[in-house]
Image (cartoon, grey):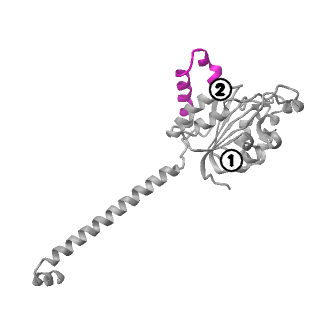
Amino acid sequence: DTIAQKNLIAFAPEFKAKDERLNLVFRQEFLSSLKYNRKEIKGISKWIKADLLTNEDATKENFLKLSPMYKIIHLATHGQANNKRGEYSFLAFSAANDSIELLHASDLYNIDLPAELIVLSACETGVGELKRGEGILSLARGFSFAGVKSILTTLWKVSDKKAASFMDFFYKNISEGLQKDEALRKAKIAYMANCSKREAAPFYWASYIAMGDMDAIELFPEPEESFLLWYILSGLCIVGMALSFYLWREKLVEISRRPVSSIAGWFRR
């Protein structure tokens, strides 16, 4: 089994507003340009050091290859639910030759993804086909089946611009060691306290829900913190050795000043 080695990886694919490539396949709305998804992942990286994959690097291949090595996975992309065939719900990634590649819910049943948390900052990732005896077949369900312990998912379409602001509050709370549900609750409160009355409408923030294990995430120490701790411990060791040497030297000086008879008596002790 793969064991997480780093804290956070974030993906922000690029989509071109006038691109008709997906429309040729699905005969529906274009995947519009996401103007703020790169800003979103840069914003969260100030709270938790992250590896950021943007534009042509935010591919499905890189997601499948790299994600198992991280505790937290963040996807700032396009998502779409399929209410008739839940396994066809998808997330969109960049691909070679300036094209788009889709990760379907059905793909998730064949991968192993032992992350602590995946944040699906995309539209409709928590809804899909309601199947009798199965429940809702959604992207969130697929990630849970793949082994992700907890999922931050969405119930309807979300605002690209407002998601960037909302996620900033959420990751600040996660970095402070809050439980995931409490981090989400406080993020919603902070978002409403820092936006206009119109933007405080539930449409902008109530879509986000948390599923799974709500325990706080024990993050790996950042490299800077590790080096700082190493420097402190090294400094203490050096100071201790210097102090021991100084005391030993003072003792020798004291002995050398004594009469020979007293020194001999000292050694017989």
Residue range highlighted in magenta: 182-206
Residue drawn at (62%, 51%), measured in percent from left and top? Answer: 4
Q: Is residue 251 left or right of residue 21?
A: left
Whether tag 2 and tag 1 are in contact, CB under 8 A, the answer is: no
Magenta stretch: residue 144 in it? no
Read off the residue under disc 1: 67
Give amino acid for label 2: Lys
Q: Is the C terminus in the top left, top right, bottom left or bottom right quadrant? A: bottom left
Examine the rendered structure and indicate whether residue 190 appears above or below residue 70. above
Question: Residue at the location (69% across, 29% down)?
Answer: 35
* 3D distance between C-alphas at marks 2 and 1: 25 Å
**x then y, percent, for residue 152:** 64, 35
Front residue of 28 and 210:
28
Instruction: Residue at 61% x, 53% y: name it.
Output: 5
Residue 118 falls in image quadrant: top right
Q: Main secondary structure of the magenta part?
A: helix
Identify the residue under disc 2: 161
Q: Decide which of tag 2 and tag 1 comes sooner along the chain.
A: 1
Number of residues whose C-alpha sits closer than 10 Å to that of mark 2, classed few (under 14), some (14–19) or many (20 or more): some
Q: Nearer the viewer, residue 60 or 218?
A: 60
Q: Position of residue 85 (x, y in %)?
A: 84, 32
